[in-house]
């Protein structure tokens, strides 16, 4: 049985049982056994993280930055080992997906987090010299990160964006591995601990547990030693954790469910219909549809161009081989989602059943419903089908299309395709207001699957896309304040203030307010 990482040491778990990951391509269990930890393991991790937090607060941010950069270098040095493990556990191709896309994204965001930690402006130091009130963001405490199944590197619990943001903010991380890729996560944890040791970070800064019972997971997120929680995964499990965290007032940042509506207007179909077929199919089937920004719901206006588009998409879905799904659970959930859609009135245009092939798979599935059906049964017809299944809703009028948009839940993204000559502009102006208030990121003329690591990016949105619409899980430094508190100093003596809040600021150019007027620069 594989060890867990607690307080800087790899040790045997106090386990209630074991589990194995499986190769999605074949469905065959992989050889390594991983423990399901009991509460004593979680309790030990919490104690170590609480101790590490007190020590981290006294260390210069340069040490955290050094750790993040060293960790990025170790990941690159061990890229072949990491990619091989992830390939076996997820079925994702070594190239380009793992080695050329996800791994560089992971190291880039770690380095961006290091730069943000060192530079410090993310803390937004603010001074009102007239009233002698000062404030800035300060780290909140240990953070539990629950990683998803679909991004073993870039969203991984001990390697991804939540991990990088929490560490850069000065918070230790207790990583809960996703059970779809525990070996990959273990390898990352080994490199993270090596980097932590080399950088002189306290024991317990990075820790790893693979699995707990649901009861102990809920107990973890409610524990007073924890500062915050970051979770990416299923809506059902996430809401269980949110209930436990909310009961004790614990900040929990959730990414839960999104169908990411894409509206394709008639002028765009007339202008470049074949190109849009290719863009849509490429995006919808990329990674077997296992992206949180997968275009799961497409909205069109009735007409000959729409019928031509749907016929071409259906043929592409039928002709394309179905890729592996991440686990048996994902395959079962996808099949149930398709069943919910059909029972609500959607018709299967292509696919619909698991293919006769090894591993965890489902046929590329395209479904169709009318706008009237959607408006009548909006909850069922916006069920997220995580995987290679897509629903197209056809409206008879712009008013009916707006009626569909007004029934949408919150989503991560929303996209509108329109023609370049301007014939779709009047319709665009009508449909964007209801769409804009229901999505975190509004796109024009591009599919939503790409999520750039940029300070301007919003990977968030209204519930149930996330648990809080005011924050993003992607983008440094904008993802960092999730793990901080706004700490105010009222009439505190100059000698007792953090350096960044002193009138004579030795740390450089940061945000300032002088005598009630906003400015930037050194206040000395």
Image (tube, rainbow, N blue to C red):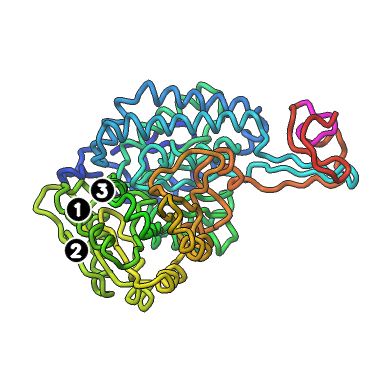
Reply above or below: 403 against 491. Answer: below
Identify the residue under disc 1: 317
Q: Is residue 297 above or below residue 71?
A: below
Label placed on residue 33: none
Check if mark 1's residue and mark 2's residue have beta carbons within 8 Å: yes
Q: CA distance from mark 3 to mark 2?
A: 18 Å
The disc, 3 or 2, on the residue closer to the chain's N-terminal end is 3
Name the residue rendered at 45%, 62% in the picture: 239
Where residue 199 appears, as percent x and y from the top left, is 54, 23
Q: Residue furthest left?
A: 356
Q: Nearer the viewer, mark 3 or mark 1?
A: 1
Task: Please provide the residue range marked out in magenta.
Answer: 498-506
Sequence-wise, the earlier of marks 1 and 2 is 1
Q: Does residue 326 appear in this view? A: no
Q: Residues within 10 Å of mark 3 (few under 14, many from 20)?
A: many
Q: Give the main secondary structure of the magenta stretch.
A: loop
Q: Disc 1 to disc 2, how far (Cα)? A: 10 Å
Q: Quadrant of residue 115?
A: top right
Q: Quadrant of residue 103?
A: top left
Q: Which residue is under mark 2?
A: 349
The x and y percentages for residue 245 are 53, 59
Q: Nearer the viewer, residue 503 or 239?
A: 503
Q: Secondary structure at mark 2?
A: strand
Residue at the (73%, 46%) spot, across then down? 487
């Amino acid at each position: 049985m594989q060890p867990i990482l607690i307080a800087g040491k790899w040790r045997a778990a106090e386990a209630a049982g074991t589990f194995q990951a499986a190769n999605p391509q074949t469905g065959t269990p992989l050889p390594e056994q991983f423990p399901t930890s009991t509460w004593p393991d979680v309790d030990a991790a919490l104690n170590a993280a609480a101790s590490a937090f007190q020590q981290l607060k006294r260390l210069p941010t340069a040490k955290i930055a050094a750790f993040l950069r060293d960790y990025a270098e170790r990941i690159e040095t061990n890229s072949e080992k990491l990619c091989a493990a992830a390939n076996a556990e997820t079925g994702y191709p070594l190239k380009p997906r793992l080695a050329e896309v996800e791994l560089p994204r992971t190291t880039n965001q770690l380095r961006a987090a290091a730069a943000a930690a060192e530079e410090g402006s993310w803390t937004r130091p603010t001074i009102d010299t007239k009233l002698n009130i000062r404030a800035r963001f300060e780290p909140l405490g240990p953070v539990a990160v629950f990683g998803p199944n679909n991004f073993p590197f870039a969203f991984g619990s001990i390697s991804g964006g939540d991990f990088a943001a929490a560490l850069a903010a000065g918070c230790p991380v207790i990583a809960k591995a996703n059970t779809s890729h525990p070996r990959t996560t273990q390898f990352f944890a080994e490199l993270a601990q090596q980097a932590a040791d080399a950088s002189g970070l306290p024991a317990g800064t990075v820790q790893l547990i693979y699995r707990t019972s649901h009861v102990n997971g809920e107990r973890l997120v409610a524990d007073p030693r924890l500062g915050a929680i970051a979770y990416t995964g299923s809506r059902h499990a996430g809401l269980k954790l949110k209930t436990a965290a909310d009961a004790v007032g614990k900040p929990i940042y959730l990414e839960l469910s999104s169908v990411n509506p894409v509206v394709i207007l008639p002028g765009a179909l007339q202008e470049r219909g074949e190109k849009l077929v290719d863009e849509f199919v490429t995006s919808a089937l990329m990674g077997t549809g296992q992206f949180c920004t997968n275009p799961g719901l497409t909205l069109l206006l009735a007409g000959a161009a729409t019928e031509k588009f749907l016929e071409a998409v259906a043929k592409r879905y039928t002709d394309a081989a179905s890729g592996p799904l991440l686990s048996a659970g994902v395959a079962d959930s996808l099949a149930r989602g398709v069943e919910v859609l059909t029972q609500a009135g959607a018709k299967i245009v292509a696919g619909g059943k698991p293919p006769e092939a090894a591993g965890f798979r489902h046929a590329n599935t395209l479904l169709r419903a009318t706008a009237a059906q959607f408006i009548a049964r909006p909850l069922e017809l916006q069920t997220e089908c995580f995987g290679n299944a897509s629903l197209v809703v056809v409206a008879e009028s712009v008013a009916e299309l707006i009626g569909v948009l007004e029934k949408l839940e919150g989503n991560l993204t929303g996209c509108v395709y329109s023609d370049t000559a301007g014939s779709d502009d009047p319709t665009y102006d009508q449909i964007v207001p209801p769409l804009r208030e229901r999505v975190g990121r509004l796109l024009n003329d591009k599919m939503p699957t790409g999520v750039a690591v940029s300070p301007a990016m919003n990977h968030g949105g209204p519930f149930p896309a996330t648990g809080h619409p005011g924050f993003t899980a992607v983008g440094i430094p904008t993802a960092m304040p999730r793990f901080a508190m706004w700490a105010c100093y009222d009439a505190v003596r100059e000698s007792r203030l953090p350096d960044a809040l002193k009138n004579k600021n030795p740390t450089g150019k940061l945000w300032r307010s002088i005598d009630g007027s906003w400015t930037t620069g050194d206040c000395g």
